[in-house]
Image (cartoon, rainbow, N blue to C red):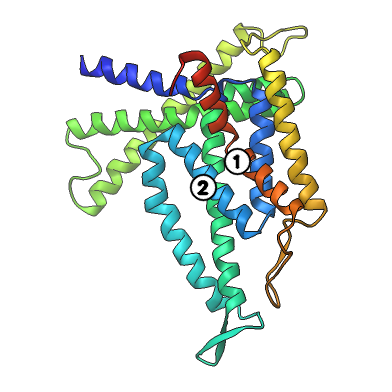
Amino acid sequence: MLATNNLESDKKTVMRDYFGRLHPGINFIYFAAVILFSMFFMHPVFLAISLLGGFAYSVVLNAKKALLFSLRFLLPMLLVMAIINPLLNHAGATILLYVNDNTLTLESCVYGLAAAVMLASVLLWFSCSNAVMTSDKLTYLFGRAIPSLSLVFSMVLRFVPRFKAQIQVIGNAQKCIGRGVDKGSLITRAKNGMKILSMLTTWALENGITTADSMRARGYGLPGRTSFHLFRFDSRDKSILLLLLVLISTVFFGFFTGENNIRYFPSIVMRPITMGSIIADTAYLLLCAFPLLINAVLEVKYHGSF
């Protein structure tokens, strides 16, 4: 009964991510835009918006895993990068103090923190992209343009979790007969680990041959062969894509007019707040919160409330 309730709860959580159920083209355009913007826009306002937006959507997709990932990895990485960069980079005009005859500048400290936030934002958005852009979506988008590469990429995404599950099955089986990697001396554990790795390699090779035979039997590579998919670009997707392109274009306009530009060295220089910068910041805020807004709107539309 408990397992059934957990399954229903997980299914309900997946169903609440309406953005991930949109057309794969919309998902791909969105993640390509936010990842590129997160990589190249170093303005503090843009960095904060990107970090918060990526964290919020990752929590929606992965819940506790996203929180643990942020606390165990991203937060320590932010602190380490923010501390190491000013110790290695001594550029900047505002000297705070001297450490072993080396200058510690305000600009290097601020840039180190900005670079750490940028990297954390990109990692968060990549984690969201991996959760939404499944192998079938990638195959659908790039199957005709680059069929071999899309097939290899989708197979890699499919085999990695299978390898992880299979090595756990093999390890548990070996542990039951006293050949686990946690028993015996160091040499014995190394031998047991090599046996498990050898079994996994044999299983992977056999699985590869079976997959190749199955693909050949299903007519892979034959001319005129079609593929089945359930994706359909409807009127809802058209409206959402139009809104998404408007937001991306507005952010691009702010970039080309210099509204979101910043200079860290030799001194920190930012443009004053103008109506153009407010519009660009608002557009980027809406863009990073786009999946959450879509989920909220469609949740109200289909269920009447959150």
Q: Indicate the position of residue 22 as horizontal and vertical percent values.
A: 61, 21
Q: CA distance from mark 2 to mark 1?
A: 8 Å
From this viewpoint, is residue 94 visible? yes
Q: Is residue 201 above or below residue 139?
A: below
Q: Is residue 18 above or below residue 194?
A: above
Q: Tell me the kind of residue under disc 1.
A: Cys
Q: Nearer the viewer, residue 29 or 159?
A: 29
Q: Indicate the position of residue 6 as horizontal and vertical percent values.
A: 29, 21
- The residue labelled by disc 2 is 52
In the picture, measured across the screen, residue 92 lies left or right of residue 199, that is right
Q: Is residue 125 above or below residue 113?
A: above
User: Residue at horizontal 61%, vertical 56%?
Assistant: 45
| Number of numbered discs overlaid on the protein picture | 2
Q: Is residue 262 above or below residue 128?
A: below
Residue 8 is drawn in which quadrant? top left
- The residue labelled by disc 1 is 288
